């Protein structure tokens, strides 16, 4: 197959849709990046990418301005992240490193803020222990990462965790905004022959299901997906859309202290939230800015349309995508501490 060469000097197949930086784009996008040398306001951080180490900016961030914090730190594995790298530590060292930035960072959160922390089976124990010291743990989400290498002497590792925490018992959560649309395997009908808890459509039989803490409908970005970059641990836009729609409103402020290639900011922009992310690698920052520019034209999120999430392999059935891919107005809101009724979680 004929190959093409990109600005990163990698040969790629013609159908490869990986986002790269063309000649001159890095300089153009780098001009948009922010670097902090003194305390700033929330307004100054709004919809910005900060190209610095997190420890350099901690003291400059304002107090209590973040509604939703999404944290995807290096797992306790030896891995290269562009110009930076992370080396595996023992459990005590990793705990100390995690606490050194996590505890000081909590001051930027509003009392009603929600926090999502990503980890794997190695780091989840540390995350839980630290979160229990400072936060209210609401749940642990496990999502299937279908990619992964097989193992001859162990179980194949193809899942990751996301710890859902809040600053207090008063927080926002919209379960109806993250319902999953599944094909009906057993289409039961009532005594009158009407569909029981499912819907007959032109494209088949589907059921809307409540969101659970096991996510099996995600696809890790790969070369033929238009959101893919060369970042080694890029999260799917669909994953971030679930988090943002469930735990933030339009206009809320979403913060990501380990932004990587910008997925959190991109999804926040597509869904009408304000955003800010911190990333040390200038190449990834520029990729984030390029993706943000692309989002001005294309606001679709793969696997999310018509106000619902769809299970895998249903692209052919998805119609009626709203212009912004946003949740429809009729969706109900569950909001603790704001006069809404309390439901069992």
Image: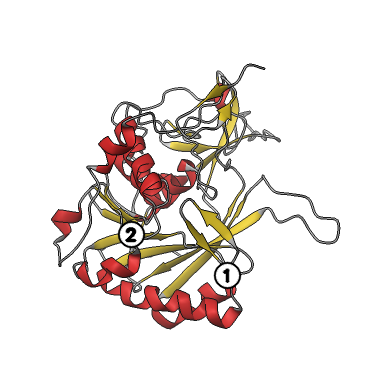
- Tell me how far mark 2 sits from mark 1, CA to CA: 20 Å
Q: Position of residue 198 (x, y in %)?
A: 57, 35
Residue 111, above or below 343 = below
Viewer-proximal residue, 70 or 4? 4
Work out which residue is located at the far right of the displayed protein and give it.
152
Question: Element type at marker 2?
Answer: strand
| 158 sits to left or right of 162 | right
Q: Position of residue 323 (x, y in %)?
A: 32, 26
Viewer-proximal residue, 221 or 254? 221
Total marks in image: 2
**Numbered circle sitting on residue 224:** none
Residue contact at pointers 2 and 1, CB within 8 angstroms: no
Q: Check disc 1: other Cα within 10 Å, few if <14, some if 14-19, many if 20+.
A: many
Asked which quadrant contains residue 168, the reply is bottom left
Per the image, the residue denoted by label 2 is 68
Question: Element type at marker 1?
Answer: helix
| 212 sits to left or right of 325 | right
Is any atom of residue 295 visible in this view? no
Per the image, the residue denoted by label 1 is 124
Residue 340, above or below 188 = below
Quadrant for the N terminus, please: top right
Q: Residue at x 46, y 69 (%)?
A: 138
Viewer-proximal residue, 217 or 199? 217
């Amino acid at each position: 197959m004929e190959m093409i060469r990109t600005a990163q000097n990698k040969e790629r197949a013609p159908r490869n849709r990986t986002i790269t930086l063309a000649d001159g784009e890095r300089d153009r996008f780098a001009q948009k990046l922010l670097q902090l040398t003194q305390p700033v306001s929330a307004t100054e951080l709004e919809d910005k990418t900060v190209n610095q180490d997190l420890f350099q900016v901690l003291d400059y961030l304002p107090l209590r301005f973040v509604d939703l914090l999404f944290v995807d730190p290096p797992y306790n594995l030896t891995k290269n992240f562009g110009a930076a790298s992370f080396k595996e530590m023992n459990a005590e060292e990793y705990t100390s490193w995690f606490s050194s930035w996590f505890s000081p960072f909590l001051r930027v959160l509003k009392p009603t803020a929600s926090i999502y922390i990503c980890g794997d089976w190695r780091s989840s124990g540390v995350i839980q222990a630290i979160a229990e010291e400072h936060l209210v743990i609401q749940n642990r989400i496990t999502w299937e990462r279908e990619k992964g290498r097989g193992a001859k002497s162990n179980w194949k590792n193809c899942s990751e965790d996301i710890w859902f925490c809040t600053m207090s018992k008063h927080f926002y959560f919209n379960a109806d905004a993250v319902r999953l649309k599944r094909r009906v395997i057993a289409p039961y009908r009532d005594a009158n022959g009407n569909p029981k808890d499912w819907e007959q459509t032109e494209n088949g039989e589907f059921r809307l299901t409540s969101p659970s803490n096991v996510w099996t409908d995600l696809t890790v970005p790969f070369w033929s997906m238009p959101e893919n970059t060369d970042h080694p641990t890029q999260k799917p836009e669909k994953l971030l859309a679930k988090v943002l729609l469930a735990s933030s409103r339009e206009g809320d402020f979403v913060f990501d202290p380990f932004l990587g290639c910008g997925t959190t900011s991109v999804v926040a922009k597509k869904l009408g939230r304000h955003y800010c992310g911190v990333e040390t690698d200038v190449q990834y920052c520029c990729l984030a800015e390029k993706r943000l520019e692309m989002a001005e034209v294309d606001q679709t999120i793969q696997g999310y349309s018509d106000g619902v999430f769809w299970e895998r392999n249903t692209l052919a059935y998805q119609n009626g995508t709203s212009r912004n891919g946003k949740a429809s107005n009729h969706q109900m809101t569950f909001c603790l501490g704001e006069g809404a009724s309390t439901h069992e979680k």
